[in-house]
Image (spheres, grey):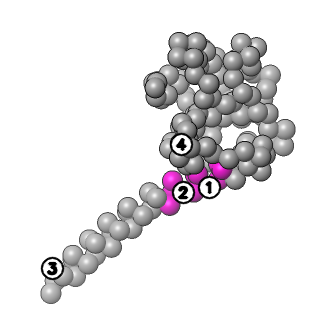
């Protein structure tokens, strides 16, 4: 009888653990999708796309290195599937402005969005959902190029 009880507890723990990851993923997709739809009237598309989120305040060094990485990726792979969303348009170089879509969040909602956005944040989307969201920090060795899948 005890083994059935322990099996039941284990089963419930596994079900809860598996479902909580799905809820988090759906939450991120829901929040990001609602944000880009309300602010820019667009939806997450089926094809692979990267959004680079740049809030008003952040590490200037993180931006500089990440922009260099991004320029290199775009030049070497002729990639068009990048969009920058920012509340700080002054930080973006003219070279990047000429190579990719830039959406300026004039309402400042990006800065208070209920997601883990700090410094420069990479969001990968595909099949109408967010695959991952990761803030780039030079302190722990993050590198934008290593996070972007080269196809």
- How far apart in space, not on screen, are marks 1 and 2 (Cα)? 6 Å
- First in sequence: mark 3 or mark 4? 3
- Element carrying mark 2: helix
| Residue 94 found in image quarter | top right
Q: Which residue is mark 1?
A: 30
Please say if the residues under marks 2 and 4 sit with CB atoms less than 8 Å apart.
no
Which of the labelled discs sits on residue 126, or is there none? 4
Q: Which residue is mark 3?
A: 3
| Occupied quadrant, residue 75 | top right
Residue 10, percent from left and from top: 26, 71
Residue plotted at (58% across, 35% down)? 49
Identify the residue position indicated by label 2 in the image: 26
Query: Per the image, is 29 magenta?
Result: yes
Work out whether mark 2 precedes mark 4 in sequence or the reverse, and give the earlier one: 2
Residue 132 vertical position relative to residue 92 in the rendered view, above or below: below
Q: Secondary structure at mark 3?
A: helix
């Amino acid at each position: 009888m005890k083994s059935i009880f322990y099996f039941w507890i284990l089963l419930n723990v596994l079900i809860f653990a598996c479902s909580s990851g799905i809820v988090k993923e759906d939450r991120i997709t829901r929040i990001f999708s609602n944000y880009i739809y309300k602010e820019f009237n667009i939806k997450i598309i089926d094809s692979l796309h990267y959004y680079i989120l740049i809030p008003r305040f952040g590490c200037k060094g993180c931006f500089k290195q990440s922009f260099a990485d991004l320029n290199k990726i775009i030049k070497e792979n002729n990639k068009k599937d990048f969009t920058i969303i920012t509340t700080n348009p002054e930080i973006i170089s003219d070279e990047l402005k000429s190579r990719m879509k830039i959406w300026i969040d004039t309402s400042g909602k990006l800065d208070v969005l209920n997601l883990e956005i700090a410094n420069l944040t990479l969001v990968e989307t595909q099949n109408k959902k967010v695959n991952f969201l990761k803030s780039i920090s030079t302190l722990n060795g993050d590198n934008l190029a290593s996070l972007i899948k080269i196809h």
